[in-house]
Image (spheres, rainbow, N blue to C red):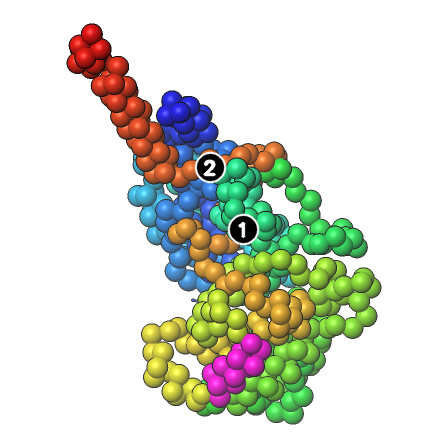
Amino acid sequence: MAVIALITVGLTQNQPSPHNVKYGVVLDAGSSHTTVYIYTWPAEKENDTGVVSQIGECMVQGPGISKFANKVSELSNYLPECMQKAKEMIPVAQHQQTPVYLGATAGMRLLRLENENLADDVLEKVTESLRSFPFDFQGARIISGKEEGAYGWITINYLMGKFTKKLRWLFPLGNESNSQETYGALDLGGASTQITFVPGNQTIESSENALYFRLYGKDYNVSNGTIYDPCFNLGYSRVMNISDLTNSPCTKTSKTTLPFLQLKIHGTGNYQQCQESVFRLFDNSDCPYSHCAFNKIFLPQPQGQFGAFSAYYYVMNFLNLTSEEHLSQEDITDRMENFCSRPWKDLKTQFGDVKEKYLSEYCFSGTYIITLLFGGYHFTPDSWKDIHFMEEIRNTDVGWTLGYMLNLTNMIPAEQPVSKPLSHSTYVSLMVLFSLILVAAVFIGLIIFHKPSYFQKDRV
Ligand SMILES: Nc1ccn([C@@H]2O[C@H](COP(=O)(O)OP(=O)(O)OP(=O)(O)O)[C@@H](O)[C@H]2O)c(=O)n1
Ligand SMILES: [Ca+2]
């Protein structure tokens, strides 16, 4: 029996030790900032799922690349600090084989809409900068919102091991019935948001909003230059340029000509009023399909579990709203009312180390997220519990970058592989145990059958 057990375990888990390690670098050029991610994986197991992990990340100092549109020459000093870090983390011998990809998101999509030449200039300059490093640079491009959502979805499901088929015979009693269902992905950045999930048995009514994979098997009424804003805390004020509001392609349609160039905003800190204003941003009228998100965009009813990352996590984590215990809608409202009503002076005292830009916007950002989820994507108080706010899984950040790299390095096979059923430590323990049983069995056998002299004498 011990021999059979040894052979069974050996055959089901033949794990060669990884010695050849590969690396990959992806730059996430977001609207608010750029982050460099450094990944590694064992070369032999390239097509296995869950083997790529993040070994480093570096946040580039300064704003997003789109903000350099009128000063592209400054971009030459932008990336070197973080790229130098990548050089230090990756062994020199591996530099030339290490692919480097840059994907730009909403900030650059908006710049391209406004002025294509400027967007090209920015990409050209970052390309020039990245070419000066000893890596295998694979290009800098603007990724579409659809790709961004898709790669975030791949990342989260890859990291959660949702693409692997578990061997059922090893977990006969486990509640594994839903374990293979994929997670939906919720991403929110400075200038765009994506929701991606596998819909239930609903018809895809707009192919523009669908992707097929085969993998692993307001307007404010103002009469002067001051407005009172319920989404900022009481005592907070900020001056902003009207052009910052009206120059974005997102606001081009609501052309309101104002008789002044600047606007002074004073916070009044009122969650209910803030929510009413934000809710008006989501146009839920005249849906041409059976279900819409907002602004007439096709979206089936959200289905299954969701991982919410990027700004969803930063903001909700700050507001203490990421708890896995079920928070009722009243709990959420109470916490938001409480936070928004706090005087700005108090917040500054308590959270002196938090960047002022972020701190001042948490009342707004939290309200925006809650309104987007309930009023935009139509989550319900009941399905809210299916949203899991997360920053990383197994030390790897959740975002679109990992999925982007997996795709471009052809690390996603079309057919579903079967995962190793045991962890390496369980495998080794079982092998040792069965070996001991085998040795003990042989030993006992020897004693019984080779101690014959006494028995034989007695018999004689
Ligand atoms: N420590 C942080 C970092 C970010 N934020 C919030 O997150 C938003 C930006 O999110 P980020 O993921 O940095 O956006 P980008 O990737 O740069 O934008 P996009 O994906 O739209 O291109 C900020 O406006 C801010 O509200 C925050 O609250 N705390
Ligand atoms: Ca982003």
The residue nearer to you, when weighing 1 against 63, is: 1
* Label 2 Cα crowd, 10 Å radius (few <14 / some 14-19 / many 20+): some
Q: Look at the image and say whether residue 220 sits in the magenta stretch.
A: no
Quadrant (top left, top right, bottom left, bottom right) of the N terminus: top left
Q: Position of residue 71 (x, y in %)?
A: 48, 60
The answer to which of 436 and 178 lies nearer the viewer is 436
Residue 344 image offset from top left, x and y in percent:
43, 86
- The total of numbered circles placed on residues is 2
Q: CA distance from mark 2 to mark 1?
A: 16 Å
Which segment did they paint magenta? 328-341
Viewer-proximal residue, 90 or 179? Answer: 179
Q: Is residue 329 magenta?
A: yes
Identify the residue at image location x=43%, y=89%: 343
Disc 1 residue crowd, few under 14, some 14–19, many 20+, Cα 10 Å: few
Indicate the quadrant where residue 132 lies.
top left
- 61 lies above or below 52: below
Camera sees residue 214: yes
Which structural element holds mark 1? loop
Residue tagged by mark 2? 421
Q: Along the line of sight, which residue is nearer the eye, 380 or 173? A: 173
In the rendered image, is residue 237 in sight?
no
* Type of amino acid under label 2: Pro
Left or right position of 136 against 306: left
Lateral position of residue 455 relative to residue 63, left or right: left
Ligand 2 within 8 A of label 1's CB? no
Residue on which disc 1 sits = 175
Residue sitting at x 66%, y 52%: 198
Q: Residue furthest bottom?
A: 223
Which secondary structure, mark 2? Answer: loop
